[in-house]
Image (spheres, rainbow, N blue to C red):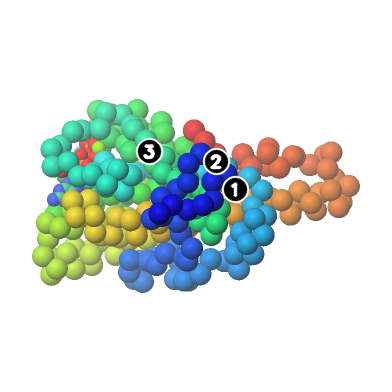
Amino acid sequence: MRSSLTPLGPPVSRDRVITSFPKWYTPDACLQLKERFHGQVSTTCQRKNTGTVGLRHSKVVVVGDLYVGKTSLIHRFCKNVFDRDYKATIGVDFEIERFEIAGIPYSLQIWDTAGQEKFKCIASAYYRGAQVIITAFDLTDMQTLEHTRQWLEDALRENEPGSCFVFLVGTKKDLLSGAACAQAEVEAVRLANEMQAEYWSVSAKTGENVKAFFSRVAALAFEQSVLQDSERRSSARLQVGDGDLIRGSPPETQESTTSSGLGCC
Ligand SMILES: Nc1nc2c(ncn2[C@@H]2O[C@H](COP(=O)(O)OP(=O)(O)OP(=O)(O)O)[C@@H](O)[C@H]2O)c(=O)[nH]1
Ligand SMILES: [Mg+2]
């Protein structure tokens, strides 16, 4: 079964249709505890009054040490496959995943970066304009958790302060017992709070939490885009009201200065 909303290209698959706000993994480290879209977002979407949001995507950058499972996570979500063999990412790669959120088409442009040191300078060139930064570590190797601080710092440096949603993701959940996972999560949640990040444990092998995680990423990014779009349009209207239209910047120009996350690289 597929959604019938098809303004651009083929319809999105049913499991990419998001109607209610996806829940967090743990309330101990989550970006928002609410369970509904912002009232203004719901109203805007019901009226299909989203301007160019229907054409928009959010840039998501996935960073973390080599071998932690960044590519596997993305491939599980975008292609529903899992490869046991390790093939290092060289530089960067990306996937585009289409959603329909609150009735509006929306895409995530997911950038997979290489964890190997020798590719770091290539990969870091793609950090700019991220609306979402996903820092990944291997739940079976706590050193990789410690390294996420540096990965995040590098990615944030290329973006406007406060412009990115940050997620901390523990991978390979299938390799740990429940108790061992809970133990690793205590450390991870502590660090997530320090980073002001939302925490998730996932397994690319079994698929556990992978779809729920990316749905959450998409919903948060979408909501922020709609709110920013509304804000931009009302400030453009205000400028018209003030007779300041000629002196003021047009909305397109404003976007590039006020919203680093919505741009394309
Ligand atoms: N058991 C298990 N193995 C996993 C999981 N995710 C990844 N792996 C394995 O871990 C290895 C590394 O995975 P990749 O996804 O290639 O790691 P990466 O972070 O993209 O590595 P780089 O591209 O070098 O930065 C591969 O052999 C995967 O099969 C998982 O959820 N469970
Ligand atoms: Mg990779």
For the question of whether residue 262 can be seen, the reply is no
Who is closer to the viewer here, 203 or 123? 203
Is residue 214 found left or right of 188 in the rendered image?
right
Amino acid under disc 3 = Glu
Which residue is painted at 46% across and 37% down in the image? 128
Which residue is painted at 51% across and 52% down in the image? 4
Q: How far separated are the C-alphas under marks 3 and 1? A: 19 Å
**Which quadrant would residue 153 be assigned to in this image?**
top left
Is residue 207 found left or right of 12 in the rendered image?
left
For the question of whether residue 91 can be seen, the reply is yes
Numbered label attached to residue 257: none
Q: How many marks?
A: 3
Name the residue carrying label 2. 8
Name the residue carrying label 1. 53
Amino acid under disc 2 = Leu
Disc 3 packing (10 Å; few <14; some 14–19; many ≥20): some
Residue 64 image point, x, y percent:
28, 44
Name the residue carrying label 3. 95
Sequence order check, earlier mark of 2 and 3: 2
**Which quadrant would residue 214 be assigned to in this image?**
bottom left
Q: How far separated are the C-alphas under marks 2 and 3? A: 17 Å
